[in-house]
Structure formats: C-alpha cells, structure tokens
C-alpha cells in the first residue's frame, strides 16, 4: 500500500494526538500549521519541548521543578530559610509567590494523602521534609496544603511527625474557600490566609 | 407556606401541564396509570430532591424527550409567591451526564437553595416496606427528615461518606499489603469520630423528639399499645464528649476486626431506626397491614416534628394510601391530618375518601396525562 502521508508528517500528527484534549482532527491541523511555519518558529517549538525534559529537574532541597539545583528560591540570599511553606504542587508555589508577601522557602510534596487514589505518605516528599526539618535550622513549618479532606489529612500527618522537634507548625487560616485549591485562589485571599495562620 | 400550583414539562406522562392547587385537601381521582402519582412525585422531587420511586432521572423524563422540568409555586403567609424549579436531563448516548439545574423564579440557584424550601411528608405505597427493608433505607429516611430542618446534617453526611471511603481504602491497603501504622490512620479516626458524633446525635435527638407523637399516632390508628420507636446507636450518651469517647473506645475495641475485614465497622453507617414491640423488631412478626399502620404513625409524627421545628405544617403527599386501609383507619387518618395542613392525595374512586375528607376536599379528576 502506498504511503498516503509523508512519513515525518504522519509521525508528527501521531505524536500531537497523544496530547490531552487533542483529537486526530486537531492534531492534523496543528501538524500542517507547523509544516507551514518558518524554520525559526518550528525550531523554537522543538527546542522548547526538548528543554523541558533536559533543562528541568527537581530541586533537591524543596523538590520544586526548577532549572538549577538548588532552585533560585532555595539558593537566594534574600529568603529566610527558617520558615518553610509546605505545598502540594509546584503551581501552589506560584500562587504564594504572586502575593509577594512570603519571604521564606518552600517544600513541594507532589500531592496529598488519598488512600482511595493509592496515595500514602511514602508516595509524597514527606520523609524528605522531616529530614530537612531535623537538620537545617528550620523554626516554622507553614502547612499550606489545600483546604479539603485530603489536604487536612496531609497537614495533620506531617504535624504529628514534626511536633516533637520544637518547631512551630502552623496551618493556613480558613480564609480559603473550603474544598477550593490554593492555586485558584486570588492574591488577597492567599495573603490573608498566610497572615492568619494558626498553630496546628 | 402552601403550594398554589404545579407545572410540568415532559415529566413522566405529561408533555405540558399546569395544575392550580387549592388550600387544604386536594384529591386527584382517576384510574391506575392515569398519572396521579406523577403529580405527587413531582412535588417530592422539588421538595426533597429525590423521587419516591425513580432510581434515575431519565426514568422521570417523558419518552422521546431529553429534558424535563418540574416546578411548584409556593405562597408564604405574607402572600409572597415563588416558583421553585428543577430541570432533569436524560443523558444522550455517548454524551457526558448533565447534572440537574435548579432555579427560583427563573433565576439559577444552588440545589441547597431550592431543596428543603418546601417541607413535605410523603406516604407512597412502597413506604410500607420501610420497616422490613435493610437498615440503609431507614437511615436514608431519617437523614432526609433531619436534613429538612438542618442543612449541616446534609453536608456532614457528604463529608462522612468521603471519610468512610478513604478510611476503608486505607484499611484494605493494610489488609492486602503492609499493616497500617497508627500515625497514618489517626486523622481518619478523628474525622470519623467527629462526624459520627454529630450525625448520630442529631438522628437520636430527632427520634426522641418524635417518639411521643409516634406512640400517640400509632394508638390512634389502632396499633398495639406497646409499640415504640428508638434510635439504635452503637454508643450511648447524649453529651457530645461522652458520645465521642464512646466511638473512640469502640474503634479501639474493633481495631483488629476492622483491619482483618478491611472495612469500617464503627459509625452511624451501622446504626438504625428501630420500631419494636417490646424486645421484638416489628417486621419479624407484624402483618403488612400492621407495618403500614406503624409507618403511617411514623410519618404523622414526622409531620408534627417538622411543624415544631419550622413553625408551619408540612405538605402531606398521600399516594393511594386510603384504599389499603380499613374504614376505621381511614377515619383515624382523616382525623390525624391537621385542619390547617395542605394535603395532596390520590385515589381511584372518590368513595375511598372518608366522608369528612370528601366534604372538605377539592376533587380533581385525572385521565391519562390530563388533569382537570
Ligand atoms: Zn528549591
């Protein structure tokens, strides 16, 4: 059977259609768009795709996704390493950074405890957090997990692991809508929740 | 508050109908299959959210249609009127399920703003099975009753269901893999105890409050004098702290069995509403007629209880109940309905209404999807 589509184009359509929300029709349209793009634009796209895999890594201190290890926040002189804000996802770091209010550092857990979804404490960066709290002169942990059942379960679990170490453990104030995610909250709400944090 | 009209669009046998409702008693009269029950079901859906018989919204949508609308018009004491509306969707094949929409006077509302605005007490023929059914049916009945006067109960039940789901998943993982350390289950235990205490106490308080009315109603309807109702909780104590302590102790006691079975054995999902004569649960010996009488007494007590909490009598929905009762019980039921209450009832023929009901009722003939 003769090849109806040139092989490189077929391959591009095939790869694009693996993306979430992209059906075969859309994949074809995108592929032809790339085909007609200037060599510079097409090269920039390819480079950007390559770069997220080769140039990004986890920061070995806070486990945020970063270009360098340690990340820009962990290696900055302006940040107060005594205060660690614990969040579920990298996007939550962004939400708190947007407020411009927080001068401490972060710890990204990469999820929240949820037995139904098979997520147990060992599946999260909790052991690393405990290790970090034990060694690095940390004075306060702000548990900024989402204000829902799973976020609360995660916060309480961490709280009971840390509580013996003489570290102040606080939880964001209830200003966030219950069940809502940190990453969708506006700056004012996040600022208020940070300011009003309370001992666990 | 009373209902002044029902409006239906593609609901069950009705393509489009608006039925005005008079105060007091309205009797829908017509042969079986004419669509009398559909009218009561429609009111039930707007008042409580669930149907008396449909397992799925699609069942309530007229054949060939994909959307049904049910609305009731309410009038409060000060004369203000309001249309409360629920839109039901039948999922098209392959399409995503659409969830219901709620509205008041045409403006979109959240479910919690529409459901519960009208309080109803309903008796449908299948309610006769309540006492002989599995405990889950009685818990659902009791929870729906409590939720009519306490919104926190509804949200606590939702939260409790999620805690149970998570805790059970954890217990199963512990059974199939490594045992779960105490530190990992502690949060789920404390949430379970907190919500169990709230839910169980609300249910128990409600049953204790309606007990005198239940006994009185049962006697009036000719039931055995020893008949009684109680909340069968796993732990005692009407003080929240004592109750929470009880649940904590029971959790410790059942820990090994829970771990071995991989499921939660402690909490209000294992409790029950018990109707008994002495030591014996009613359905183990009572005839269907006696069970029906007991359930009717329960519903009449529920109505008094609702009135005590909301200040107005609920709307009674009585589906084909009279034909199943003997003359004495019909008279007793007619006498037990409060004079100022609104009641919608169905009957095949007018003569099944007792004299004193027929005198003050508005009779509305119903024939194959047409009313009036
Ligand atoms: Zn870092």
Image: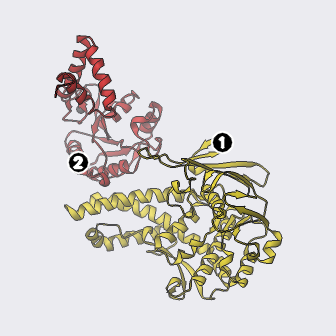
Question: Circle 1 marks a residue in which chain?
Answer: B
- Circle 1 residue: B106
Instruction: Decide: few, some or many residues near mark 2? Use Cα within 10 Å; few <14, some 14-19, many ≥20.
Output: some
**Which residue shows up at 47% across the image and 48% down it?**
B91
**Which residue shows up at 24% across the image and 62% down it?**
B174
Q: Is residue A67 visible?
A: no
Residue B179 placement: quadrant? bottom left
| Circle number at residue A123 | 2
Can you tell which chain is drawn red? A
Residue B319 percent across, percent down from the top left = 65, 69
Question: Circle 2 marks a residue in which chain?
Answer: A
Nearer to me, B22 or B297: B22
Instruction: Give the spatial CA distance, label 2 vs label 1.
Output: 48 Å
Palette colour of chain B: yellow
- Dividing the image into four equal quarters, which quarter contains ligand 1? top left
Single out the residue that lies furthest toward the front.
A1
Residue B194 percent across, percent down from the top left = 44, 61
Residue B301 percent across, percent down from the top left = 65, 73
Residue B14 placement: quadrant? bottom right
| Circle number at residue A74 | none
Single out the residue that lies furthest toward the right.
B359
Q: Are discs 2 and 1 less than 8 Å apart at CB?
A: no
- Marks 2, 1 in one chain: no
């Amino acid at each position: 059977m003769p090849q109806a589509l040139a092989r490189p184009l077929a391959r591009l359509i095939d790869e694009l259609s693996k993306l979430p929300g992209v059906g075969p029709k859309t994949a074809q349209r995108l592929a032809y768009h790339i085909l007609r793009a200037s060599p510079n634009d097409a090269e920039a796209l390819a480079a950007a795709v390559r770069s997220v895999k080769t140039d990004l890594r986890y920061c070995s201190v806070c486990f945020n996704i970063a270009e360098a290890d340690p990340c820009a926040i962990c290696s900055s002189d302006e940040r107060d390493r005594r205060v660690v804000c614990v969040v579920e996802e990298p996007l939550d770091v962004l939400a708190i950074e947007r407020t411009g209010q927080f001068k401490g550092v972060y710890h990204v857990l990469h999820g929240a405890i949820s037995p139904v979804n098979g997520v147990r404490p060992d599946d999260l960066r909790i052991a690393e957090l405990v290790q970090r709290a034990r060694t690095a002169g940390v004075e306060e942990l702000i548990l900024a997990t989402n204000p829902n059942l799973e976020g609360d379960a995660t916060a309480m679990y961490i709280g009971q692991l840390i509580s013996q170490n003489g570290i102040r453990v606080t939880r964001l104030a209830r200003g966030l809508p219950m069940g809502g995610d940190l990453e969708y909250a506006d700056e004012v709400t996040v600022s208020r929740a940070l300011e009003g944090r309370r001992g666990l | 508050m009373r209902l002044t009209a029902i409006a239906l669009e593609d609901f069950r046998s009705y393509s489009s109908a608006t039925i005005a409702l008079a105060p007091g008693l309205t009797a829908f009269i017509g042969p079986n299959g004419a669509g009398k029950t559909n009218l009561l079901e429609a009111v039930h859906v707007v008042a409580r959210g669930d149907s008396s018989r449909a397992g799925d919204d699609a069942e309530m949508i007229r054949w060939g249609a994909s959307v049904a609308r049910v609305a009731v018009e309410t009038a409060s004491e000060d004369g203000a009127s309001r249309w409360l509306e629920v839109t039901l969707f039948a999922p098209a094949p392959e399409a995503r399920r659409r969830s219901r929409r709620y509205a008041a006077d045409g403006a979109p509302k959240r479910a919690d703003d529409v459901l519960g605005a009208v309080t109803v007490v309903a008796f449908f023929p299948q309610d006769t099975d309540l006492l002989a059914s599995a405990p889950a049916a009685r818990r659902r009945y009791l929870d729906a009753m409590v939720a009519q006067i306490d919104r926190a109960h509804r949200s606590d039940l939702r939260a409790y269901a999620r805690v149970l789901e998570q805790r059970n998943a954890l217990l199963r993982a512990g059974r199939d893999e490594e045992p779960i350390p105490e530190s990992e289950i502690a949060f789920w235990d404390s949430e379970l105890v907190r919500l169990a205490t709230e839910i169980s106490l609300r249910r128990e308080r409600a049953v204790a409050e309606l007990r005198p009315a239940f006994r009185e109603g049962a006697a009036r309807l000719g039931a055995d004098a020893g008949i009684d109702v109680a909340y069968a909780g796993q732990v005692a104590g009407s003080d929240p702290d004592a109750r929470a302590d009880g649940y904590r102790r029971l959790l410790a006691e059942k820990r090994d069995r829970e771990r071995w079975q991989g499921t939660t054995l402690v909490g209000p999902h294992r409790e029950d509403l018990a109707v008994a004569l002495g030591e014996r649960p009613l359905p183990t010996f009572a005839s269907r007629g006696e069970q029906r009488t007991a359930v009717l007494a329960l519903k009449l007590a529920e109505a008094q209880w609702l009135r005590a909490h909301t200040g107005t009598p609920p709307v009674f929905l009585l589906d084909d109940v009279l034909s199943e009762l003997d003359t004495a019980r019909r008279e007793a039921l007619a006498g037990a309905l409060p004079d100022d209450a609104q009641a919608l009832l169905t009957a095949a023929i007018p003569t099944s209404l007792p004299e004193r009901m027929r005198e003050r009722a508005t009779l509305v003939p119903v024939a194959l999807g047409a009313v009036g």
